[in-house]
Amino acid sequence: MRPRRFVEPVRPVRQNLINEAIRAPKVRLIDDDGSQLGIKQTSEALEHAFAKNLDLVLVAAEADPPVARVMDHSKYLYEQQQKAKLARKHQSQIHVKEIKLRPKIGKHDYETKKGHVVRFLNQRAKVKVTIMFRGRETTHPERGRDLLMRLAEDVKEIGVIESAPVLDGRNMVMLLGPTKQAGVARDAKAEDEQGGKEALQGDGGGQAPAPKRDEEPQSGEEVRPEEAQVQ
């Protein structure tokens, strides 16, 4: 039998009770301008809100008595959605990439790995560099530390050490983070390429193509051969 796929349940969004859904007999009423109106019967608070063409919203159900506020509930929900959207827009996502090296790595492999580190840093991602020791290599951790510091020195213009090399079992780990210069050269190159394409498109569209030799226009005074023949 095919196993069922686990789906994490979605928690319902808690919504404030409004108007007739408020079951408490009394509420501590806050007017739409923020002024405190004291403890009122819920029916009286509803009449006050409806008289202003607004809603009565329960904002603190755990209080004794519960706190209700007079407001435009639809406008309130819209403002909350816009705030949440703006917060998600400005929220920075941190990506961590990992590169694994051996303490006796060859020159060509080192350059390849370093290229990956440079690419990740230019993407403004953090890079976790791991040195993997095997066998007797664990007796010389300084080789792994020297290799990590060499890598940090080679990418110092776009990467900074956020976590110094630390020995963790048979591995040594270092964390690199992007500097302010990371990705700047890449973005500038992309802008130059885009500007070059636009310039080429503009030059090509400003002039009409030259007519071919067999498509050159004839002069209006030229006499056709058949008209020049004497009848």
Image: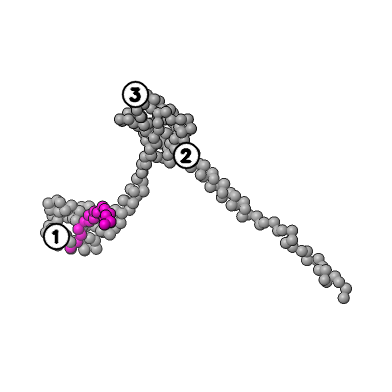
Camera-side mark, 2 or 3: 3
Residue lying at 18% horizontally and 52% vertically, measured from the top left: 60
- Quadrant in which the N terminus appears: bottom left
Q: Amino acid at mark 3?
A: Thr
Q: Amino acid at mark 2?
A: Val
Query: Image quadrant of residue 15?
Result: bottom left
Disc 2 residue crowd, few under 14, some 14–19, many 20+, Cα 10 Å = some
Counting labels gives 3
Residue 143 magenta-highlighted: no
- Render colour scheme: one colour
Q: Which mark is residue 105?
A: none
Residue 136 shows in this picture: yes
Camera-side mark, 2 or 1: 2
Q: Which residue is mark 3?
A: 139
Residue lying at 13% horizontally and 58% vertically, measured from the top left: 24
Q: Quote the CA–CA distance across marks 2 and 1.
A: 59 Å
SS majority, magenta: loop
- Tag 3 or tag 2, which sits nearer the N-term? 3
Q: Which type of secondary structure does the marked residue at label 1 adopt?
A: loop
Q: Which residue is mark 1?
A: 23
Q: Nearer the viewer, residue 136 or 26?
A: 136
Report the side of 161 relative to 185 (left or right). Answer: left
Give the residue at the far bottom of this rendering. Answer: 231
Query: Image quadrant of residue 157?
Result: top left
Q: Bounds of the magenta span?
A: 1-20
